[in-house]
Image: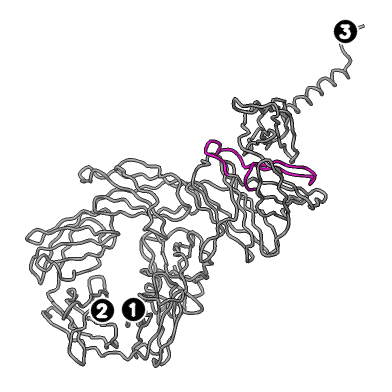
Amino acid sequence: MTDDPPLRVVIACVLGLLVAKESHASATTVILRQAGSGATADCRAHVTVEGGAELVRACGTPVLVTGSGAVGWVETDTTITPFVTDVSNGGEVRIAAAVPAGTVAFPGVMLGPGERIRLVSLSPLSKDNASGWLFVRDVTSTEAAPRMPVGLAVALLLDREDRVVGASRPIAVRAGATTDAAVVTHPEGAVLAAWLDRPPGTSANSRTSVAVAGEPRDRAPDAEVTAGNAIFAVWYGLEGSSARIAVDSDEVRLADDTVAIARGNVVLFRRQLRLLPALTVTIGAPPEDAVLPRTLTLSVARAVDEGKVLESRAVEAGHTYELGRLPAMPLVLDLRIGEFVLQKRANLSSGDDLTLSIPLSPVVVSGTVYAGGQPAQASVRFVQKGEPVVAETDDRGAYSVTLWEPRRYIVETVLADKPASPPFAQEVRIPSSGTLDIRIPANHLRVRVYDAADRHSVSGAQVMILNRWTGDSGSQSSVSSVTVNGASAELPPQHPGTVEITVRAAGYAPAEPLRLNVDDSTRDRTLDVPLTKSSRRAGRRIFLNGLPAAGAELATFADDRMVWHDTVDADGYVELPPSTAFMRIVARHPSAATLVFFTGPISDVDTLSLTPAAPPLLIRGVDRQGHPIGPAAAQVSIWLTGSVRLTGAEAAFATWSLAATAPDGTFLARGLGANPVRILVTRHATLPKIESGAFDALSKWIAYPWAAMADVTVAGD
């Protein structure tokens, strides 16, 4: 006889150990206790395990939980924990039953097979427990008397497939009382409940708000609550076939934000919030001989709203900075180096973190200012965002300035002996350090505007000057304007070439444009412009939101130049001269969508209504491989509505832009309506070829609402 056990006993023991090991790996024990010195004997621990079953034990009693996702809270006869805690890892957990409790009942509600009611507390968490999870409990029998934290709550009816088929109005839970609730559909509109899970590592106290995006304004939730794990919000009576959830936060974003809705339906929109992308910026080290101010300032703003700075800080050359969480959209960075503003763009629309380098390479420009061929003392202004960079010459006209970016600049020069005169302006490409002499023409032109009947001066008249000339880089032009204050107005010095002058004044009919040739022999000259009072029988009245659209601008174009321009007065009226008959007119206003209309005979006063503008549209020109174009500019054409294409000067006026891409390949269009638009980007085509329609088929429709940035492939490359 042997002492060895039979083989079948050994096998059974091994299997038992394996089963026990597997059971231990998938199950754990948790003990919930009431926190604080005021623990009471009536404390009960509640644990909801995977699958929705709710286990109730006396506080301090072990509870076996399996799987993941188990949460717990504690209750007494009068109080309850206002949040739930993840207890899936087991162990001893102390939780305070910190707020009064009430009971919710569902008289008349019948639950079908597999259906249940999900109660969500809307009571806000305090700063002490802001990291707690939303208080949620499921009810599988309407005979139960579930207890909830005092305040508001919402009940959702779920079918056997976990679809939401009904929702209550906000339920007022009162301390020590029972509140009856109904869970129904809502035929007056759609009900949308949004559960937005927060990513790990976010702060429950960070600023986050949600709304249903719409026009003219977003709609805030009818009820909402924010906790450490999620945001829950409910809207009642929504109209339409879809809704877009807008999340405004300094820490998180919502990538998939649109949900289908329908009248009478209840929809649960559950999505995972994502962290906003982080931007890291490295400021390059300048050459050893470069002179930098002691402090540099770096600021960042949205590309569609550069005036609203998101963040600004002092930085130093040769250092790297983490700018933190920023909106997932194209951004503009301004590095202020003394007077100079160095601009860079950072596209965060993908949501990925980004590292950007800003090299510091000084561009030293020096030269001499000449007036009529003689050196002259002056102020030279390099126009940029904000205040210009100013270089003062010495008494021999010599100047020197340090810029920090090679690009095109508008350079304005004001002579020291004529500080009140309009500046001489020219556009100059500065690719690197070098010499830039400024030669101001010797002509001095003035415009005298007067009433044709009584010869009295017409003060306040607007004078627009179109100067065309041929320079080293071919045909060039510039547009400037002055206001007549007094008997006459001095014009800026004009390049030798042609000058076209248009004068407009309130209450007067537009005069025919003056045209003259300017050459080196042109000196002092005064141009008389008599105006005739208007009968105001032919024109347009322009309205916006039912009110006169004062300040709106109207213009007509021919041969890629503006041939007429006027501004709507305080009564919403603008007079149309006979020259605009049977022409296409572009009307724009800072707060409105640009409107294009066609005139007939100019014989009466008609009324037009402008609509509010949509947010700016940012596009990016890309090549066939999807790479951004640049630094050479590409021309942008746009169809606002129908088959009306705007190109060149007309497109620039309509979109408050230059109608061309920036060095990084982007183009920002303002003044668009809340509707799809069509965009064409071309780089090597001539204007006549574009206007012939040869490239129209290569244009791209951009759907509304806009994405953060839309890519458009360059046509004809």
Q: Secondary structure at mark 1?
A: strand
Residue 329 is inside the magenta segment: no
Q: Is residue 266 above or below residue 374?
A: above
| Kind of residue at disc 3 | Asp
Q: Which residue is mark 3?
A: 3
| Kind of residue at disc 1 | Thr
Q: Quadrant of residue 278?
A: top left
Q: Secondary structure at mark 2?
A: strand
Query: Which is nearer the N-term, disc 2 or disc 1?
Result: 2
Q: Is residue 216 above or below residue 569?
A: above
Q: What residue span does the magenta drawing correspond to?
A: 124-152
Q: Secondary structure at mark 3?
A: loop
- Where residue 462 is drawn, which disc sits there? 2
Residue at left offset 75%, top offset 39%: 53
Q: Position of residue 252 (x, y in %)?
A: 52, 47
Apparent side of residue 337 relative to residue 397 in the rendered image (left or right): right
Between marks 2 and 3, how big is the CA–CA gap?
Answer: 117 Å
